[in-house]
Image (cartoon, rainbow, N blue to C red):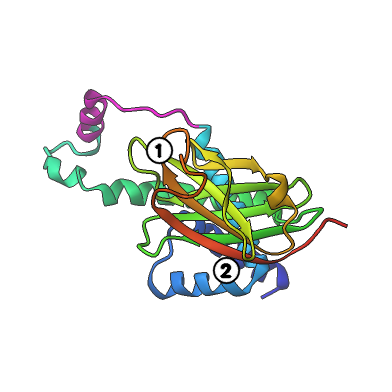
Amino acid sequence: MTEDDVHDDDNLLAAEYALGLLTGEEQADARRRIAADDAFMQAVTAWEIRFAELADEIAPETPSASAKRQLLARLFPEPAPVRFWQKTWLWQAASAVCLLALAIFFIADFGDQTGTDGPLYTAEIVAEAGDFRVIAVVDKTTNEVIMTKTEGTAPEGRILQVWAHGEGEPAISVGLWPDGDSVRLPMPPTIAEVRGVLTLGVSEEPPGGSPTGSPSGRVFGTVDIPGVTDVF
């Protein structure tokens, strides 16, 4: 096996993790690699951002009941129990296969595109309940935070808000995350000046954001990003 084969295998594994296709020990191994291997973490981040951007470009469509009936009639000349098609796992599996094929296409066509011209820090925010997960990227060349939501969302009638602070400092708002799977937010000057450990977090708040200047709703999770420095 050549070095290129190993690289392609890692890139494909990162794409599978980003799509949520890994389970059990494979998923646990991938999470351990994310924590210990910066290159693999950046590969996962790149794939999750690509998939989120692809999803944002697709206008939501609700298929009509007649379209579903026609599809069933073509696939199954014999009447099929409706309950079978109401099981969401079949549709999820079909979608995952399509997305995996798309991931393989990206690997073959674009290769490694996780490089950057400046300091780029990546981390993952995961709720303890496992119902919310975000990949965070801090770009010190532009002093921006890029968030990509890969699981979960704010409750109905609420909004996500991104927070940050330096070591031993109170959290301040980076900005609101009103909709979509990805958001790019400029860092407030106080946060852009943080050196060393930068902490990021996401909470759910009323429309318009927290009325207190601090997280007032559920904090889904936080993550510490060590070693943050200036761009030289």
Is residue 76 toward the left or the right of residue 185 in the image? Answer: left
> Is residue 102 shown to the viewer in this render?
no
Observer-nearest of 176 and 59: 176
Three-letter amino acid code at the position of disc 2: Ile
Residue labelled with disc 1: 206
> Is residue 197 shown to the viewer in this render?
yes
Q: Are marks 2 and 1 in contact (CB under 8 Å)?
A: no
Q: Residue at x 36, y 56 (%)?
A: 131
**Please, is residue 24 above or below residue 181 in the view?**
below
**Please, is residue 140 above or below residue 222 in the view?**
above
Q: Residue at x 24, y 38 (%)?
A: 75
Query: Which of the two discs, 2 and 1, labels the residue nearer the N terminus?
Result: 2
Q: Residues within 10 Å of mark 2 (few under 14, many from 20)?
A: many
Three-letter amino acid code at the position of disc 1: Pro
Observer-nearest of 201 and 131: 201
Residue 177 position in % (x across, y down): 51, 39
Residue labelled with disc 2: 34
Residue 35 position in % (x across, y down): 57, 71
Residue 136 position in % (x across, y down): 59, 54
Residue numbers of the magenta segment: 58-73
Which secondary structure lies at badge 2?
Answer: helix
Is residue 169 covered in magenta?
Answer: no
